[in-house]
Image (cartoon, rainbow, N blue to C red):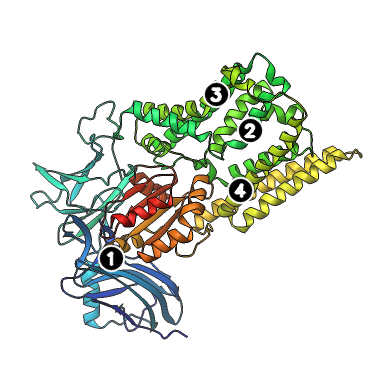
Amino acid sequence: MAVAQDTASGDHVKVRWLAPDTFGPGEETIGFYFEVDPGWHVYWRNAGDSGAAPRFDFAGASGELGDIQWPSPVRLPIEHLTNLGYEGDVAYLFSATPKASRMEIVVNLEWLVCKVDCIPGYGNMTLSRPVADAAQWQPVEKALRDRFAAQVPVPATRDNFPWIVSNVAAATDGDSLQLVLEAGAAEGAAAPAVFPLDGGLLTAKAPQVEESGDTLRYTFQRVPGAVLTPTTGFVVSDGEGAWQLDDIEIQAAATSAPTANPTPADSGQPLWLLVLAAIAGGAILNLMPCVFPVLSIKLFGLVGPEGEAAGRLKEGLRYAAGVLVTFAALGALLLVLRAGGAAIGWGFQLQSAPVVLGLILLFWVMALSFSGLYEFGHHLMNLAGNSRGGSFVTGVLAVFVAAPCTGPFMGAALGAATLLPAYGAMAIFLGLGIGLALPFVLLCAFPALLNRLPAPGPWMETLRQFLAFPLYATVIWLLWVLGRLLGDSGWLIGTLLMLVVVFAFWLGRHQFRGSRWIAWGLVAAALLMSFGAANSLQQSGRESGSVPVASEQSWQPYNRNAINQALARKQPVFIDYTAAWCITCQVNKKLVLDTEEVEALFRANDVYLVRADWTDQNPDITRALGELGRNSVPVYVWYAAGESEPILLPQILQVDMIEALFDDE
């Protein structure tokens, strides 16, 4: 049984409660008092370039607890970095309201204390104090609490904030953001210190301050590659008081007279080069296993008797139209969401459980048809490839199933699409579509290539049955993806839907009275219930933050604070940005990252391994990808020991690339 601890300690830090001897019945502000050795420091909520904020995980309490209240920080420049935190002692406060005769609190602590080197600390603390009619404090403790409570920023209002927020705007050069304050009641006062709340958007470096009359203009540096958010926040401190500005809207341009068409962010590469990269990346997608099942179906149609018609080129153009229209729709959706402040990336459609379930159903039905269980005749073949309308639909389907793959050239092009203006982003999406459709169109345009294929015959039926197996494999993979999104319930929902579909086929083939109607009714009910359950489970999982993600030994889940701590203690870090629906990621994992050879290399060099799982929507991972200039996976990031600048590895990994990381050292 764990022994109750009123204190916790580590190298250069002692932590104790700042609490009354007896609680009163109402709300009381209490806290954790960090006694830090001279010269050492701990961190604020936004730790800055390399620090890490302390974590307070409350494991239980006999009352209500409020959020941690962070005293206003100071800047801590260390070489070329700037951190935000506290030199010497500090108290992190929170409110506590008893709901029993004793106030009991159990908490797990984690902190990082730094001078030049950093030392992580951990501890468990419990608090047990009686509750009476009134709170009773030791005078010294209460004075200490009040001193730090006075340093906690209060929400800025028109009545209590001595300045007026005139403007917050992103500069046209794309690498800075300006906060403009007008002196109100603070006329003639010195410029206050301003700290950004969002460390993912703005660096901790002290802003450039310009004074002009009653106007103060603070120019902050933006984190390279960070996606601009619709709003942001600051803490303003004049040394005596502190105020917090939340959700301040960011305007499009920094100047007082903005241009009608603000200059968009520059991706750093000429647009024509990015479009060429997109075309190449799209063409390579045809070689990826994601696209193979769909292309094989269409190819099967071309070599059949109906494919001998002179309209093959038209078939190819219809297929290309389906690809381009779908890429244009996805690009437009990305632009709309980007304009609304959302951050998404390539493959985002497979982050939706209903979409994955729909693809499972589609491929399951197609596979059953290819196996001869059910003859869809004009219905499914129209969809899959033999009819005119089918060519367009096949193109649509090819884009959807291509989403799990990003090959060479695609990553940089897609990353640039998140930064470029609308026309540039759309050009890149259409470039991807041209690349994906081009090989098939060429095959249709030059019959000589088709003539090299075998003549139609009985082998086609064998081929059709053989092609069912890649579809079954695709269904298994999609079920696995659904399981990663929804946990065990995902498997259950997917397999039950497949069972109902097969039962409905069996029922429909038995010509007793009403069997077909019963079959259709069963399918309709199963669709309604399974899609509803998938959507509901995913939404509830996101709201509770409990979406299950499988953990793997030696790989840690993405946690920015933990990564910063590893970097601070000069431990090398390798981050695998991956997703269950990303086949390229899974191939790299099996052939390279999870091999005994590479795992031994990582262990021998004490590498901190992070697997950033993007299977479901994760704003932190999306933002981290944006900071790297990417919006797709896989992305492999390497921080050598003692280095804060990341190195991006190629998307197609090889073992010798991992070995080279350590050869360089």
User: Could you give the CA–CA distance between mark 1 and mark 2, rounded to whole angstroms?
Assistant: 52 Å
Type of residue at label 2?
A: Ser
Q: Quadrant of residue 86?
A: bottom left
Residue 296 shows which numbered tag? 2
Residue 477 shows which numbered tag? 4
Earlier along the polypeptide chain: callout 1 or callout 3? 3
User: Could you give the CA–CA distance between mark 2 and mark 4, rounded to whole angstroms?
Assistant: 18 Å
User: Could you give the CA–CA distance between mark 4 and mark 3, rounded to whole angstroms?
Assistant: 27 Å
SS label for mark 2: helix
Identify the residue under disc 1.
569
Earlier along the polypeptide chain: callout 4 or callout 3? 3
Which x, y percent locates residue 171?
23, 37
Earlier along the polypeptide chain: callout 2 or callout 4? 2
Residue ID at (9%, 52%): 189
SS label for mark 1: loop
Rendered position, 411 above or below 43: above
Type of residue at label 3?
A: Ala
Residue 320 shows which numbered tag? 3
Which x, y percent locates residue 402?
54, 37
Closest to the camera, between mark 2 and mark 4, is 2
Earlier along the polypeptide chain: callout 1 or callout 2? 2
Earlier along the polypeptide chain: callout 1 or callout 4? 4
